[in-house]
């Protein structure tokens, strides 16, 4: 029987991998469509913001008006800041889209290599079942059933562990962003009471660090959501996960609208805390699922051992 067992274990692992890849490919295709639309939207926004800058730097009526009222430098600085913010968001979306396409291509290729594993597994399992029946005994059939369930649970535990690892990575980055915002808030408060240029520079340095981390968090949340694609969770948790990918857009807008205003930092802190709470909630649910699957798997292994020991051979 051992040759059967070895082949069945290998094929079952392939079937579990195929199921995960199917969910992953579906999720990545949805992400590709979302980021494609978002990239196109941001590209148009970049053109519009740059056009505003070009109008003020040219001979438009708007430029003449702001020159007359003495607000030209202020208005031009504002338009350039908005154009820069639009470009930052567009570049981030392009990188995310490229990452999604790369992941999708790799997953589709691997999925194609496993396209007939389920048929091969079913055929070989039927062959072994006939051999077990031919050998006689209900114990052998029961062991086969328990081993199949145990192997399934083992694959589930692995998938849950991978999802948890992805969530933990996102949580670490969220904490880094929260720390940077906390520092920016402290310097911003000092700046309000006369901290001067040094306080202003320090505040923006921490905001820059937070901004850089947000892009990393966006990618990590996307990866987390992808890992969760084949994990069964409740509807409420699914809603929370879908909200992850909107967080960075709000964060980008919050920082670049007027990053000298302390209230914007407070809003960003609330957003990152909300995202952190969502991550922790999903991680807690995943841990519960993993504990349940591990306990059932261990119980099955004990039962298999008992059955094997009861067979005089």
Image (tube, rainbow, N blue to C red):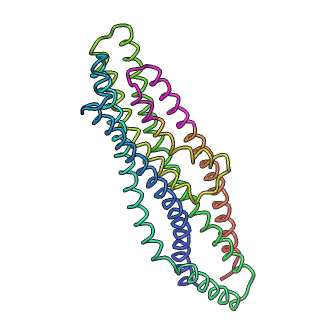
Magenta stretch, main secondary structure class: helix
Residue at the spot 70% in from the left edge and 72% down from the top edge: 307
In the picture, the quarter occupied by the C terminus is: bottom right
Which of the 4 quarters of the picture holds residue 60?
Answer: top left
Q: Nearer the viewer, residue 250 or 180?
A: 250
In the rendered structure, the answer to whether residue 67 lies left or right of residue 171 reads left
Q: Nearer the viewer, residue 60 or 4?
A: 60
Residue 28 x %, y %: 48, 59
Residue at the spot 53% in from the left edge and 37% down from the top edge: 275
Residue 115 x %, y %: 51, 78
Residue, far left: 58
**Magenta stretch contains residue 120:** no
**Magenta stretch contains residue 257:** yes
Magenta stretch in the rendered image: 251-277
In the picture, the quarter occupied by the N terminus is: bottom right
301 is higher (above) or lower (below) than 264: below
Residue, far right: 138
86 is higher (above) or lower (below) than 108: above
Residue 246 x %, y %: 51, 43
Q: Nearer the viewer, residue 43 or 53?
A: 53
In the rendered structure, the answer to whether residue 267 lies left or right of residue 156 reads left
């Amino acid at each position: 029987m051992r040759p059967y067992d070895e082949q069945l274990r290998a094929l079952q692992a392939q079937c579990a991998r195929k199921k995960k890849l199917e969910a992953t490919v579906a999720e990545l295709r949805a992400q590709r469509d979302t980021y494609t639309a978002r990239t196109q939207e941001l590209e148009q926004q970049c053109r519009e913001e740059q056009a505003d800058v070009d109008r003020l730097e040219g001979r438009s009526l708007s430029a003449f008006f702001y020159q007359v009222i003495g607000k030209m430098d202020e208005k031009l600085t504002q338009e350039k800041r908005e154009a820069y913010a639009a470009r930052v968001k567009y570049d981030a979306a392009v990188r995310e889209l490229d990452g999604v396409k790369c992941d999708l291509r790799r997953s589709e290729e691997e999925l194609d290599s496993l396209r007939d594993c389920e048929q091969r597994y079913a055929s070989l399992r039927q062959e072994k079942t006939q051999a077990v029946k031919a050998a006689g005994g209900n114990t052998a059939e029961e062991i086969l059933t328990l081993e199949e369930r145990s192997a399934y649970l083992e694959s589930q535990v692995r998938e849950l562990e991978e999802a948890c690892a992805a969530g933990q990575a996102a949580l670490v980055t969220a904490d880094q962003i929260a720390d940077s915002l906390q520092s920016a808030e402290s310097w911003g408060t000092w700046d309000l009471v006369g901290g001067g240029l040094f306080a202003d520079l320090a505040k923006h340095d921490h905001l820059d660090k937070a901004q850089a981390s947000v892009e990393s968090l966006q990618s990590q949340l996307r990866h987390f959501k992808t890992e969760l694609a084949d994990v069964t969770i409740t509807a409420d948790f699914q809603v929370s996960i879908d909200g992850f990918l909107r967080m960075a857009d709000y964060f980008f807008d919050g920082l670049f609208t007027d990053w000298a205003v302390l209230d914007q930092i407070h809003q960003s802190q609330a957003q990152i805390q909300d995202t952190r709470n969502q991550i922790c909630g999903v991680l807690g649910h995943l841990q519960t699922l993993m504990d349940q699957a591990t306990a059932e798997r261990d119980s099955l292994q004990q039962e298999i051992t008992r059955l094997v020991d009861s067979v005089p051979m």
